[in-house]
Amino acid sequence: MTSNNPPSLRRRATAAGVAMLTALSLGAGTASAAPAGPLGSATPDHKAVLDARDNLYNQTNNLPPQLRGPVRQGIDNTANFIAPGALKAREAERARAAAKKRAEAAAAKKRAAAAAAAKKRAAARKANNPCPPSARACVDLKNQVTWLQRNGKRTYGPVRISSGKRGEETPRGSMVVTRKVKDEISREFGNAPMPYSVYFTNNGHAFHEGDPYVMSNGCIHLYHKDAVQYFASLNVGDQVFIF
């Protein structure tokens, strides 16, 4: 008389799973002519064993819960017997791959955040600094500073200046260097010295050496060393942007 109690069913189901995996694994390894190991293959094909294991594992999905666990355990036990360490190695590899994916996602998120922050800083700089990349010299009248740049990257400064006083304000906008006179004097203002003059309008406005804490009659006063640098760096035709 056949027993229908659960332990008996579990044993039979487990045995069936083991037998099926063993048959599939042996079938995958029949090409080997080497002396057999415990189940007929000297070096079992781990991929074939794992593929057979996965196929059988998926077929247990429709088994009753009380049978599914023992059958799956039997399948895994058999896979471990035929290909020792294969399951564990695959699980470790999957864990490494998952960890790598998480790390890459975290790194990508960090890069995106850094790029967004850099973009925000660039927008803020642009809002505070309208001087275009094409300009060779920039003058910020509000903050009384100037700097030299090339392709938008600063090459000198910012340095302290003074600009035109009330009623004789320094003009704003985009201009170009028109001429340079090293030992210039101002005939309009009693031959006042204007060393290292770099003119950027045709109305007498220039960068030149002067006290950067004394307002001018429209020119840009620079300390001596800064005036020397501007005279050496700027050429006729270079763009000057004043804002």
Image (cartoon, grey):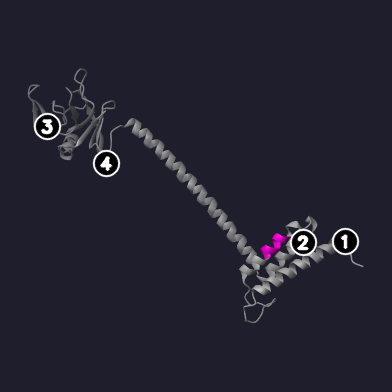
Query: Amino acid under label 4?
Result: Asn
Marks 4/1: CA distance? 85 Å
Q: Position of residue 199 (x, y in %)?
A: 14, 31
Tag 1 and tag 3, C-beta contact below 8 Å: no
Q: Is residue 92 above or below residue 137?
A: below
Q: Earlier in the sequence, mark 4 or mark 1?
A: 1
Marks 2/3: CA distance? 97 Å
Marks 4/2: CA distance? 72 Å
Query: Amino acid under label 3?
Result: Pro
Give the labeled residue for mark 2: 70
Give the labeled residue for mark 1: 5
Q: Is residue 226 above or below residue 83?
A: above
Nearer the observer: mark 2 or 3; the answer is 2
For mark 3, does the 10 Å Cα neighbourhood hold few (<14), some (14 to 19), or many (20 or more) residues? many
Q: Magenta residues, as a range?
A: 53-59
Horizontal side of 57 relative to 144 (left or right) equals right
Q: Nearer the viewer, residue 130 or 142?
A: 130
Query: Amino acid under label 1?
Result: Asn
Q: Position of residue 163 (x, y in %)?
A: 21, 25
Could you say which quadrant of the image residue 122 lies in? Answer: top left
Marks 2/1: CA distance? 15 Å
Give the labeled residue for mark 4: 151
Give the labeled residue for mark 3: 195
Q: Could you tell me which residue is drawn at 19 percent across and 35 percent down?
A: 226
